Image: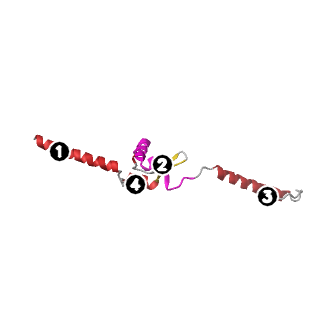
Amino acid sequence: MQSNQITFDNLPHAIGQLLAKVEGIERRLAAASEPPQQLPDYVTLKEARAILRNTVTEGTIYNWKHQGRIASSKVGRKLLFKRSDVEAMLKGNYTPTAAEQQEAIEQEANELLRQSVKRKKR
């Protein structure tokens, strides 16, 4: 509002300008106080569990993170996962880590050894 003097004749116009400015300030304050929206490509730990249909615990997802089975990013105190990675885990289309591949090979070798020992005992 301009610094002109307010008279009885221009009072309605001055009040209209004042209300418009107050509404603008309220809109800016409301926008500034809203939490930033999450990027749609990233999900929180709880959202990841929901995508996985709550078939795993938060601890399991943390273990996958530490084993390198699923990538994560930290923004502030929030742990975020790529939605596509979580969906791949749901579908079973993830690439096993080297440790997982080694463990699978060892299990297969142990099974073959057990079968071989059973045959020799007969």
Residues under labels 4 and 1: Cα distance?
A: 34 Å
Residues under labels 3 and 4: Cα distance?
A: 55 Å
Q: Are circles 4 and 1 on residues that touch, CB within 8 Å?
A: no
Magenta span contains residue 58:
yes
In front: label 2 or label 3: 2
Q: Which residue is mark 2?
A: 47
Q: Which residue is mark 4?
A: 88
- First-in-chain label (4 vs 1): 4
Q: Which residue is mark 3?
A: 17
**Which amino acid type is marked by label 3?**
Gln
Label 4: which secondary element: helix
Q: Which residue is mark 1?
A: 115
If the image is split into quadrants, where does the N terminus sit? bottom right
- First-in-chain label (3 vs 1): 3
For mark 4, does the 10 Å Cα neighbourhood hold few (<14), some (14 to 19), or many (20 or more) residues?
A: some
For mark 1, does the 10 Å Cα neighbourhood hold few (<14), some (14 to 19), or many (20 or more) residues?
A: few
**Which amino acid type is marked by label 4?**
Ala
Image location (x, y in percent) of residue 79: 50, 47
Label 1: which secondary element: helix
Image location (x, y in percent) of residue 115: 17, 44
Magenta span contains residue 64:
yes
For mark 2, does the 10 Å Cα neighbourhood hold few (<14), some (14 to 19), or many (20 or more) residues?
A: some
Residues under labels 4 and 2: Cα distance?
A: 14 Å
In front: label 3 or label 1: 1
In front: label 2 or label 1: 1
